[in-house]
Amino acid sequence: MNQQPLIAKIFLWKRFSSFTYLNITQFLVTLNDAIYRFLVAFSLITLLGTAKSSNIMFISGLLFVAPFLIFSMPAGELADKCSKKKVIVYSLGLEILGMIYGIYAMYIGSEFNAYASLFFVAVQASIFVPSKYAILPEIVKRDQLSQANGYMTLATYVAIILGTFLASFFTQITGENYTIVAVFCLILSTIGFFTSLQIGATEAKNPAKKIKVLFLVEVYKSLKLAKKYPHLLLTLLIGAYFVFTASFTQLNIIPFGIQSLKITDVQSGYILLAAALGVGLGSLVVALVSGKNVELGISIWGAVITSFSYILLGMFSSSIIFAVLMVLSLGFHGGLFIVPVDAYIQLASPDQDRGEIVAAGSFLGFLGVLLAALSLGFFSNVLKISAAGGYLVVGLLSLVVSIITIFFLPEYFSRVLAVTFFKAFFHINLNNQPKTDFYESVAIICKKPSTINILTLVYLYPRIAFIRFVEKKPSLFLKPIHVLLHIISIPTSSETEFTEALNKAISKKMPLCLFLEKKDALKKEDSNKKFIEKFFSSSKISSIFLHINKRQQKTHPKGHFGLFKILPKEIDANFSEKKEETLSYSKAVDFFEQIKTPLHT
């Protein structure tokens, strides 16, 4: 029986899920960090004078980012070596100590101690972040991962918005009594500590892992490890690029407001609320729309529209209303961009190294923060580009990145359209679908190819390729279709080429769909059987048989006016158990006779 700590029993009655308590905890940590960062800046501006405000913002920003660059990798290795729940709890304990130190720093009015306390809080956050993301696959089901990331991102940006407001509000109502505001931060961190105790216990995934001090070497090793898994390294780089663009948007908004919109710096800062609101809404949409799968294709569509939002913001920069709408669009589509990326990284990372890989992504992200600051200075001081011009340059760069991403992930780009169409017109009833690992090579055997069968398979399996036996390579006209549908052509003209192509397909570590009968089966049934037999004997992978049945819909008497009364159309998907043995064509046909009976509702 899983016993709760006594202190947790005293202060909280556990009636929510572990994920809920994790999300509350990370909300409080993010809120506290946002308030304290501004609190330190405000206190030092009061102490040293407004003339030094630029230096204060630069130094405080650098001190907050530096720990993430230095400690993210050791923190990720710690998350793999130890229980992630314990790492989270102990890091929250460190935050309480940091806030006590912060109260002391605010009380004595010391510049050194204010900076030191901010650095200490940032160290705590850098330890907390890798475990916060890496623990998700351990406390939520795989089909809930995308939704969980959406809700976490939503909570994060709500905390940023609220923290930005509360830092100014509490400073004003307390008459710039920074010690009282620091006490409020201590209360937040204490509540966060107790909510973290309610997260379910997790086991150490790799107790033998060693924690290395040379973090740059470890970042390189982690990225090299990520490269072994399909699309994982690319997704880490995409996530880091998002952090770069988000940071540039934040840094450039005040110069943009002053130069293009002719408003004050304070008024310019309020425009960022539109971006934060947009990211929160976008994250919520992903959580609601993704369903049980991680839809990486949503990120690509979000990136494309984000690119055009930057370009329009840079080209038409004189209207405040238009600027707010474009910044809102940047935030909304940025939420569509980043949530599936985070979910995919967590899902695709191997259990024993997940914390380390997430930490490497965090390191790249904060490297993007530094690059954003350097880019802003380079654009304005060296190239003499206006703030609006800076957004235009970032928009064009983002468009290039989006095109490159589509080139490497074309099947995810087209998958979003297919899944959206399927959800709009069909409802699927599943019967005995076997579980498959994320990187498992398995043959999904269907009877005949059809539009409904293909859409159903794409909907059910986010990573799936379709096997097609061909005598020669597809023409240039058909090749784009093969790429978008992820059709793998297996040449039949040569035994060597057949085996090589099949082994290459299996090495992708994903479900491979094989249709037993072609549309012209009556003409080429013998040759079709021959190569299917060869596939069964050569592949040596497990097989799952799937019979898809579209139910007959009764015609509504009002004709097309009753269309929406017969939608969505019902589809039954009947699965066999996973077969480990070598099969034959005739045996495969027999399996369909066993599973083709439609489901009853």
Image (tube, helix red, strand yellow):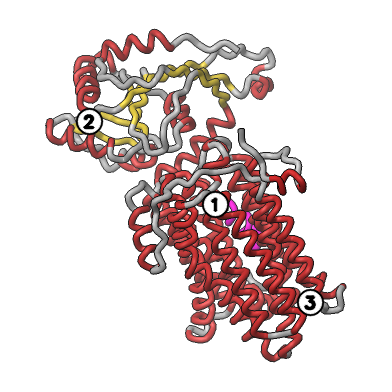
User: Which residue shows up at 78% across the image and 72% down it?
Assistant: 168
Q: Is residue 326 visible?
A: no
Q: Residues within 10 Å of mark 2 (few under 14, many from 20)?
A: some
Mark 1 and mark 2 lie on one chain; the one further toward the N terminus is 1
Spatial separation of the CA atoms under disc 2 and disc 3: 73 Å
Mark 3 element type: helix
Per the image, is 514 magenta? no
Q: Position of residue 114 (x, y in %)?
A: 67, 80
Does 329 sit above or below residue 40?
above
Q: Nearer the viewer, residue 304 or 231?
A: 231
User: Which residue shows up at 74% across the image and 65% down it?
Assistant: 186
Mark 3 and mark 1 lie on one chain; the one further toward the N terminus is 1
Of labels 2 and 3, the one closer to you: 3
Judge from the rendering whether residue 466 lies leftward or rightward of residue 294; answer left or right: left
Mark 2 and mark 3 lie on one chain; the one further toward the N terminus is 3
Which quarter of the image is occupied by the C terminus?
top right
Which contiguous range is marked in magenta?
327-338
Q: Position of residue 1 (x, y in %)?
A: 61, 33
Q: Which mark is residue 470?
A: 2
Q: Which residue is mark 1?
A: 133
Q: Position of residue 15 (x, y in %)?
A: 73, 38
Q: Main secondary structure of the magenta part?
A: helix
